[in-house]
Image: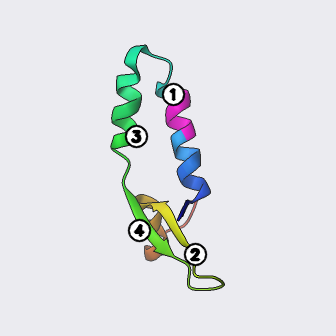
Amino acid sequence: MRMHSKVIDKIMLLVTNYGGHKDDTKLRKMIESLDFSVYTRKTGNQEVILVLTEDYVKEARGTPKF
């Protein structure tokens, strides 16, 4: 299993915004609050990918990606 690039982007954003403080308490809390879903690709090697649930729901609903 691997993480989707959007998951990495989200974690990097949180580290940039909340990292560097004493004990990184806020950063830990923000990362703990992330919600993930498992997605299995339907084509190719049917790879299993960890995605953000909010992105998974948007994609399932067909919500525009503005």
**Residue at figure coordinates x 57%, y 81% from the top left:** 46
Earlier along the polypeptide chain: callout 3 or callout 2? 3
Look at label 4 and name its amino acid: Val
The relative height of residue 41 versus residue 3 in the rendered view (above or below) is: below
Who's the residue at 56% across and 85% down the image?
Answer: 42
Give the number of the mark in front: 3 or 2. 2
Start and end of the magenta stretch? 12-16
Residue for point 45% across, 75% down: 60
Q: Which residue is mark 2?
A: 47
Please, which residue is most extreme toward the front here? Answer: 1
**For residue 65, which quarter of the picture?**
bottom right
Neighbourhood count class around disc 1 (C-alpha, 10 Å): few under 14, some 14–19, many 20 upward: few
The numbered mark, 2 or 1, whose residue comes first in the sequence reads 1
| Mark closest to the chain's N terminus, 1 or 4 | 1
Q: CA distance from mark 2 to mark 1?
A: 31 Å
- Label 4: which residue? 57
**Dot 3 corresponds to which residue?**
31
